[in-house]
Image (cartoon, rainbow, N blue to C red):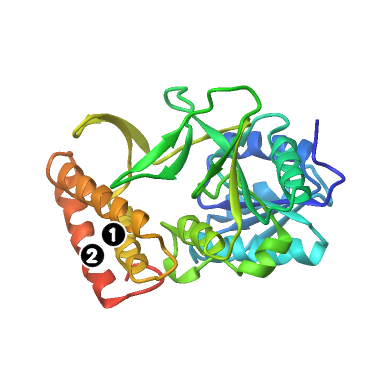
Amino acid sequence: MSAKGKAVGAVVVTYHPDAAMLARLFQSLAEQVDWVVVVDNGSGEDVLAWIRAYPASGQFELLALGENQGIAAAQNAGIVRLRERGAKYVVLFDHDSEPAPAMIASLLAVAEEKSREGARVAVAAPRYKSSEDETVSGFVRLGLLRFRRIACDAPHRVVDIDFAIASGSLIPMATLDAIGAMDESLFIDHVDTEWCFRARSRGYRLYGVCDALMIHHLGERRKRIWFLRYRNVPCHSPFRYYYIFRNSLRLQRRPYMPLRWKTAEVVRCLQLFIYFGFFSSDRVANLTMMVSGFLAGLRNDTGKMP
């Protein structure tokens, strides 16, 4: 089962990718979508040459931004190009993602079915399988003071969700036209979160598709820690905590972000601050970036970290 021939295009954002991982992604996308726009955020010339030489004439296109302009700017550039090509659906990917066979067709089938039922579809999203430990995620709803995981406990289940990771998400182009582009002022973290809640505030719905599966890397590595309960958390490079804390604080000011998200995000940031700021091996660098990001959020700084 494939989504080819149904005006589905993929946007792949690259930033110093692993060649073998990128090749697997390209091979999978070549079989599942009509067009692939690769937007490079400042990788070396060797990476660009490899992408240009990929043997899929006409189906793949490279947009080289020349520098790291952030995930939102790269996604927007790819979406604009797919709109020019006549795409009706867009699927977003990071360079470290790998969709399972028929993943995109499964997402498309749900999006089309829900649209026929009268829903305004924002996103159809897959489950994520960790490349590190083989665990498969559920989906996320907002709970009281925390983010609640929704398990896929039945075959072919489709669940209402509050937000989704951008990579692997299928979005109707008509929805992007109505809701608008990704917020480039955020640069990287919470770009997908902000867009999802902007869409929800306008009456659009998001769906988690249990039959759709994608292998994804969440952070550089994951670590099992105990903080009130055992949990697996992504361990990011220190600079990422600047964006996480800055953008979390900036989004607290936006009226369309739900109060339950705001309170749950405060709790999450406190957990990150305590564990990665005081107990991790990179605690000094992490703490420095967290404090810097928090102050930047108070100033409402935007864009790339200075």
Residue 18 horizontal/vertical position (percent): 53, 40
Residue denoted by label 2: 294
Q: Residue at x 56, y 51 (%)?
A: 14
245 left or right, relative to 33: left
Would you place residue 82 above or below residue 157 in this image?
below
Does dot 2 land on a helix, a strand or a loop? helix
Residue 107 horizontal/vertical position (percent): 69, 40
Residue 138 horizontal/vertical position (percent): 48, 32
Between residue 214 and residue 141, name the one nearer to us.
141
Q: Residues within 10 Å of mark 2 (few under 14, many from 20)?
A: many
Q: Residue furthest left?
A: 278
Labels 1 and 2 touching (C-beta < 8 A): yes
Amino acid type for the residue under numbered disc 2: Phe
262 left or right, relative to 13: left
Q: Report how far apart the C-alphas of labels 1 and 2 lie in the structure.
A: 5 Å
Between residue 232 and residue 148, name the one nearer to us.
148
The N terminus lies in quadrant: top right
Q: Earlier in the sequence, mark 1 or mark 2?
A: 1
- Count of numbered circles on the image: 2
Quarter-wise, where is residue 82 in the image? bottom right
Q: Residue furthest front?
A: 117
Amino acid type for the residue under numbered disc 1: Phe
Would you place residue 290 above or below residue 306 in this image?
above
Residue denoted by label 1: 245
Q: Residues within 10 Å of mark 1 (few under 14, many from 20)?
A: many
Does dot 1 land on a helix, a strand or a loop? helix
